[in-house]
Amino acid sequence: MSLTIQTSAVLNNNNLLLPDIHFTVERGEPVAIQSDIEWLESFHSLFLSSSPFIAEQPKNVFVFLQSDGLYTRLTPRQHIRFWKKLYGQPTNEENVLAICELSQVADKRLKHLSATEQRRLHFARCLIMPCEACLFDQPIIHADRQTKLAFYAMLEQLSDRFVIMTATSLEEAIQLGKPYRLNERGLHEVDDGTDTGQNQTQATPFHLEKISAKVDDKYILFDPLEIDYVESNEGGSWLHVNNETFAAPLPLKEMEERLRPFGFFRCHRSYVVNLQRVREIIIWSKNSYSLSLNDREKSSIPLSKGNYATLKDMLNM
């Protein structure tokens, strides 16, 4: 059985609160929706309301929102015992603590825990609560590496549930699950780019000296090696250079062809990266990878599963 979510556009005094939406979630196949925070808040409200938004409403839904709170006087272990009693579940608390990377702080009061440790405790409740569907709002935003690893480990435990996640960053949405982009034109699936790997190492005779971007009434010309990475943008591209972003008119495919001779790699359908900027290749799970850059922002951009294998071959890993 799948979970089908569908609604017509929602208006309030001629203001569009939410566009047409239609998508299906399968058990064990997480879906991630990227959009602006206003769209996501409307989506959360509608998802949690009793409406025909969901074809067959799940019996129980776990929800994690950024605004959720915890009991600051309790420890993670006490929270877990409280939830076990609340939901009537004989869950192994040590196993939950280990999955959520909380074993070392299990008996510390929450007021002594960091924000990311408290977030991992929210995740722990999902492992205890009996539910059919889970909604996570920006679960890895501003998260440290330990929290991201804990979240992916937890997702492995949710293979029997419908999992929906929301994110304001496309990079995060791609890392989290099957990515969709939500905007005023509706909900659209983002291609994961796994079919592009076979052409990565093809040589091209075209050599370029400058890449142009338009800013107001002028063009800025960049040396290709100045560029950290390039992101697809509705028929054009975003150039990421020294912590700034510039719009370029060329589609990503053409940008890839022009930059390939300078050591750029199509790591994902929506991204081309300067390999000289790559510091780490991170494996979050068997289907989720990312590249950590040594630019000013310490950017993290997605790496598709097919292109991970290609990159390993290129780097003789």
Image (cartoon, grey):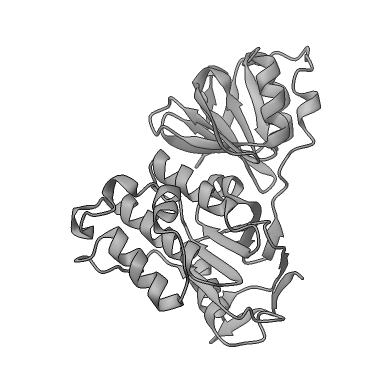
Horizontally, residue 151 falls left or right of residue 131, namely left
Q: Position of residue 45 (x, y in %)?
A: 51, 78
65 up-or-down from 314: above or below: below
User: Which of the pair 256/282 is nearer the observer?
Assistant: 282
User: Residue 166: horizontal and vertical position, in percent?
Assistant: 54, 60
Identify the residue at horizontal 23%, vertical 59% (top origin): 110
Q: Position of residue 149 (x, y in %)?
A: 47, 42
Query: Taking 51 as reference, is 108 above or below it?
Result: above
Task: Specify whether residue 226 is in view.
Answer: no
Q: How many marks?
A: 0
Residue drawn at 31 percent across, 69 percent down: 69
- Is the residue 112 above or below the residue 279 in the image? below
Q: Is residue 176 visible?
A: yes
Residue 161 location, quadrant:
bottom right
Identify the residue at image location x=53%, y=66%: 135
Among the 4 quarters of the image, the one containing residue 263: top right
